[in-house]
Image (cartoon, rainbow, N blue to C red):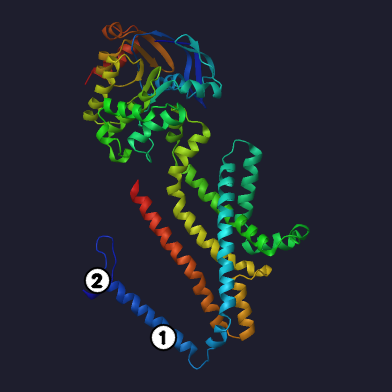
Amino acid sequence: MIRRLFLDRPQAPAPLAAKVVTFAVLLLLLSLVCTGILWGTTRQWLAVWGYREAFWQGWLLTVGLSSAALMGSSLIGVIAALARRSEILVIRYISTIYVNFVRGTPFLVLILLLFYGVPQITQHASRLFVGVLALSLFAGAYIAEIVRAGIESVGQSQRESARAIGLTRTQTYRYVIFPQAIRHILPPLTGQFASLIKDSSLLFIIGLPEVTYTAQQINSATYSTLESFLPLALAYLALTLPIAVLSNHLERRFRYET
Amino acid sequence: MRIVCSAVSKRYGPHQALRDVTLEASFAHTLVLIGPSGGGKSTILRILAGLESPDTGRVEVNGRSLDFSEAALAVYRRRIGVVFQSFNLFPHLTARENLLLPLEKVHRFADAAARADRVLERFRLTPHAHKKPAQLSGGQRQRVAIARALAIDPEFVLMDEPTSALDPEMTAEVLDVIADLREAGQPLVLVTHEMGFARKTADCVAFVADGVVRECRPAEAFFAKPETSEARRFLERILKY
């Protein structure tokens, strides 16, 4: 009987109490494990606390460059998605090559390639610009595929209907395809934005003082690893968790609305 | 209304949908295309709707020869109303917005809203004006689709099996509306499997099979005594039950 309380099935959902108890027990176990491992070692939270201002600045930079890349990658993604559907071969191929190249390459390699691979260009650009550019290009390729799938989810009959009533191509996209595609695009797109924020951590490799880079600096200065990197993880969660919640919410809303 | 096709052929990959179709139909209100499935009725309708270009041949509608360049077709399509079997309403727009989209964005009528409301009223859809297609019954959806096709005051209306996706009760509801169009003098070309309805409303019947128009005659004469044996057999089969 008790065991049945902890099963969550579509036809017999678990009671709230079971969920709370399960969660609390897991939390307790986790803290026991942590205590066991860390017992007897000393933590230097105070030393790290001294660097809170730098950490905060790093976090703000992460937020800033993620936001900039969010706009950049959306723009690139939509253009690349439309280009992949172009009737003009050159345009379609350029977009296809871009999307496949980027999606098949690790982000770290892409950053190195962009920053160190073409120094003739990047030595004149700021690290921040190269960082935002790399992140936009990287996320843009994934967004292009999300947008393309969204556009293709709108059926042929809708396009035909739009043609029959006399809408032009541009009008068809604006009034018929995009408004319907957006419900297929938004949930995975918000998820992609969470990835983008996490991926921005790799920009530490070109010395961009975002939050991961800052945490490493703090670690070097204080020789305290856990105290530097645990707040780092929490700093990312503070950004990505709300987005994950939003993404789930959008997914549910659009699923039931049709 | 007058429709003339001469030597019209259309091929989809290996499938020859139309072979040298010749059709000459003059009728006051309604031309009905009947015939077995896959015989080419819909293809003829799609060519008349400007949604498809024939591979060869000439089509003339009301004395004007159709120019099958995409630009010319785009202009041509604006003058006609098309109703599809599967309604093809825009699911993200309400019934009223479905009517308004072509009125505002294609035809740019100054009185678009008044027009939309008038047509909704005429089809007794006013109570459903602000519902999305998903909230409407099949019959209501098809009535909205017909209203959308008519709101622009089309030169003529084309309907491709407008009741095939509906149950009998909704079929009757939609057929009533189509019969009213005839009363109102709206020229109409209709593909349908509803023989009883075809018999009652058609001025002219074209029997299409195997990619060819086998015969095209006044409805009364056709239903009284089909000339070709294919048409005779088709009618016998269909009227058997």
Q: Residue furthest front?
A: B110
Quadrant hosting residue A69: bottom right
Q: Amino acid at mark 1?
A: Leu
Quarter occupied by residue A121: bottom right
Kindly give the residue lying farthest to the right in the view shown: A120
Disc 1 marks which residue?
A32
Does dot 2 land on a helix, a strand or a loop?
helix
The reply to whether dot 1 and dot 2 touch (C-beta < 8 Å) is no
| Residue at 49%, 39% in the rendered image | A174
Chain bearing tag 1 is A
Q: Earlier in the sequence, mark 1 or mark 2?
A: 2
* Element class at badge 1: helix
A62 versus A120 height, above or below: below
Instruction: Using a 10 Å C-alpha cutoff, classify the residue at mark 1 as few (fewer than 14 neighbours), some (14 to 19) or many (20 or more).
Output: few
Q: Residue B15 location, x and y as percent?
A: 48, 25
Q: Residue furthest bottom?
A: A40
Q: Is residue B161 left or right of residue A159?
A: left
Q: Position of residue B3 (x, y in %)?
A: 43, 11
Q: Which mark lies nearer to you, 1 or 2?
A: 1
